[in-house]
Amino acid sequence: MKVFITGICGFVGSVLARRIREAAPDTEIFGIDNLMRLGSESNRRLRQLGIRVFHGDIRNTSDVEGVEAADWLIDAAANPSVLAGIDSRSSTRQLVEHNLFGTVNLLEYCRRHSAGFVLLSTSRVYSIKQLSGLPLRVEGARFIPAFSEINSPGISSEGIAEEFPTTSPVSLYGATKLASEALALEYGEAFGFPVWIDRCGVLAGAGQFGTAEQGIFSYWLHAWRSKRTLRYIGFGGNGYQVRDAFHPDDLAALVWRQLQYRGLDRERICNIAGGAENALSLLELSHWCDDRFGKRQVVADFRERPFDIPWVVLDSRRAAALWNWTPARKLPSILEEIAQHAETHPDWLKLSEG
């Protein structure tokens, strides 16, 4: 089998490459990365594992057309920030070119070579308005939806399922990923190649170049350890907002199973996440940091930002049914892994920020 990974030098792409190599040493793995993300240059050492790494950009048609044929393409290249296109780090055109027009180039590659396509999508395709409007109560140190009062499809105590509305607004970032999903499904149907779409929750683990709007768990621990100012933004400034997290090793285990199946008879879209058992509020995460690193104060910031959501926990039961997949790594072990990394790499945030 030959596997082509985009964004191969990123946090997720590099983990996928390593884990596929471990699962199947005879698999030929290669990929491209534009090395735009600070810190990604360090993952060129994948070459030491016999994994070929090329400098290229999926936005450039010629860069993708020049890649040799593969059996599968895993798209781990994206601008992953929900603030992309509205902050000062990237323009709207850069966001759309990377996350949508780049997908078109990859789908054309799959069409030419009859390669299967694995798209790493996001929980951010779910409606911000619908999620922000959920009735909530405070239980302990976190928000909990009042499930008995909710009539929306696709939500339960297990989390947000694939049937939950994806109506606008979902952010510019979410819209590019949702449009990419639709295109991928249509290309797969039209040209007969398998497409798997994995709507990922928050990924977390050692070596992640986390920022506050992307890898919040990694960012919070590194910032706590380095004594940076941390803020509970919005929702009363209490830190009750909740996210679940999972490890890229678990994502790799799922993707490897997907690469073994080229049938066209399964649901194409699955949520992939830590779920309710691996969820924490920011306040609870701070309590964990108190115990691990020592007590600190977190600033209450009452600003309300347009893309913030108070509670996001994904229901991955479809992945369990289709792929016999559940996350093996529990959140305490993931946090401890990040904590140890923070202790041995005290300047990690500076490296990821330049």
Image (spheres, grey):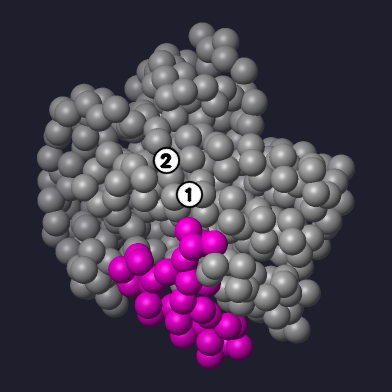
Please rate how many residues cluster around mark 1, counting C-alpha atoms within 10 Å: few if below 14, some from 14 to 19, many from 20. Answer: many
Give the residue number, with chain letter if any, for mark 1: 99
Q: Position of residue 196 (x, y in %)?
A: 70, 49
Q: Position of residue 343 (x, y in %)?
A: 27, 72
Q: Amino acid at mark 2?
A: Tyr
Pick the residue in front: 339 or 192.
192
Disc 1 is placed on an element classified as helix
Q: Residue at x 51, y 9 (%)?
A: 149
Cα gap from disc 2 to disc 1, whole angstroms: 8 Å
Look at the image and tell me whether residue 70 can be seen.
yes
Pick the residue in front: 198 or 232.
198
Pick the residue in front: 160 or 30.
30
Q: Residue at x 29, y 27 (%)?
A: 306
Give the residue number, with chain letter if any, for mark 2: 173
Quadrant, the N terminus: bottom right
Q: Quadrant of residue 329?
A: bottom right
Q: Amino acid at mark 1?
A: Asn
- Contact flag, marks 2 and 1 (Cβ < 8 Å): yes
Q: Relative to residue 162, is residue 145 depicted above or below? A: above
- For the record, the magenta segment spans 32-61
Quadrant, the C terminus: bottom left
